[in-house]
Image (cartoon, coloured by chain):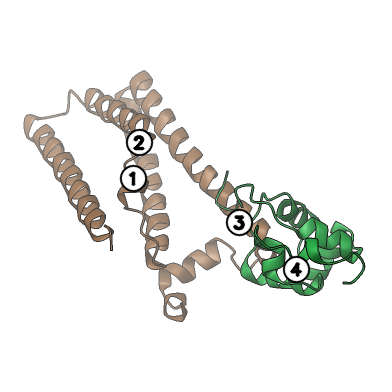
Chain colours: A green, B brown
């Protein structure tokens, strides 16, 4: 595991992206990173900077806590299609 | 960090490292490249020490000037790399970073290289030169130990 690793911590980026109806490429383009970066973030292989985390949250109409806090239940509690 | 931006070493590093390249704007690319660069630097150090040691032991005295030049060059590059990190407030002399098992093969290689250099120079080596080398090495090792120990104490529990 390198220094860029999120050490396998799970996050809700994939779930939020799917709820928003976006592909990985579309989300990547929207926040200004490569698709590989979105893939790595979703897989928990890469811990994004606070700025990228904020951009992801803004584009997915949610909060950073909802995306990256493992104890957050915001996305699970939100009914599909309300975002 | 605006004051460090004016630092000649930092400015030079920005030019040599091409830090203004748009490639660095993508944060994961930048981070992965940082890791790749660290891997590359370690590989260069290993290869240089390995090839230098082998050359000295195989070729002998004729290789000493060339190996010395390469080693000095490697030393300067490593010193600049460490200096850049230190200028930006990253301390590389912490005990946790320095005192690791991976240091053992490094030390073994350096000892083999040093012994090879001494052996290759045997004919030209006088007792006073040898004594100077041993004293110099002892002083450097002692200084490194003192600095590491002092920093370790400073970084102790709050």
Return the residue at label 2: B103
Question: What residue is at 31 percent from the left and 33 percent from the top?
Answer: B107
Crowd rating for badge 4 (residues with CA inside 10 Å; few <14, some 14–19, many 20+): many
Picture quarter containing residue A67?
bottom right
Query: In the rendered structure, the residue with mark 2 lies on which chain?
Result: B
The residue positioned 75% from the left and 53% from the top of the image is A42
* Quadrant hosting residue B135: top left
Disc 1 target residue: B98
Q: Residue furthest top?
A: B58
Residue sitting at 58 percent across and 43 percent down? A1
Residue A56's label in the rendered image is 4
Q: Residue furthest bottom?
A: B2
Residue hosting label 3: B31
Between B58 and A38, the one lying in front of the other is A38
For the residue carrying disc 1, how many other residues have a C-alpha within 10 Å: few (<14), some (14-19), or many (20+)? few
Q: Do the residues marked 4 and 3 share a common chain?
A: no
Q: Position of residue B143 (x, y in %)?
A: 18, 49
Q: CA distance from mark 4 to mark 2?
A: 41 Å
Which element type, helix, strand or loop, lies under badge 4? helix
Task: Pinpoint the chain carrying mark 4.
Answer: A
**Quarter location, residue B34:** bottom right
Camera-side mark, 4 or 3 = 4
Q: Is residue A74 left or right of residue B69?
A: right
- For the residues carrying marks 1 and 4, which lies nearer the camera in this image? 4
- The answer to which of B96 and B105 lies nearer the viewer is B96
Between residues A48 and B134, which one lies in front from this camera angle? A48
For marks 1 and 3, the one nearer the N-term is 3
């Amino acid at each position: 595991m390198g220094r860029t690793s999120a050490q396998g911590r799970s996050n809700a980026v994939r779930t939020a992206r799917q709820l928003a109806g976006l592909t990985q490429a579309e989300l990547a383009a929207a926040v200004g990173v490569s698709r590989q970066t979105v893939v790595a973030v979703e897989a928990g292989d890469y811990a994004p900077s606070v700025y990228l985390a904020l951009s992801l949250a803004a584009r997915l109409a949610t909060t950073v806590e909802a995306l990256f806090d493992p104890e957050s239940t915001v996305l699970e509690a939100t009914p599909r299609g309300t975002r | 960090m605006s004051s460090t931006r004016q630092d000649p070493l930092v400015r030079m590093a920005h030019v040599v490292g091409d830090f203004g390249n748009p490639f660095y704007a993508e944060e994961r690319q930048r981070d992965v490249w940082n890791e790749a660069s660290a891997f590359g630097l370690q590989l260069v150090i290993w290869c240089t020490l390995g090839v230098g040691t082998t050359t000295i032991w195989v070729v002998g005295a004729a290789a000493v000037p060339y190996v010395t030049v390469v080693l000095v060059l490697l030393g300067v590059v490593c010193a600049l790399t460490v200096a850049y990190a230190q200028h930006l407030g990253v301390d590389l002399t912490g005990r946790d970073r320095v005192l690791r098992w991976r240091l053992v093969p490094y030390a073994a290689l350096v000892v083999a290289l040093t012994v090879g250099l001494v052996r290759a120079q045997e004919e030209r080596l006088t007792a006073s030169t040898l004594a100077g080398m041993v004293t110099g090495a002892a002083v450097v090792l002692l200084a490194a130990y003192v600095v590491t120990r002092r920093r370790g104490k400073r970084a102790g529990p709050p």
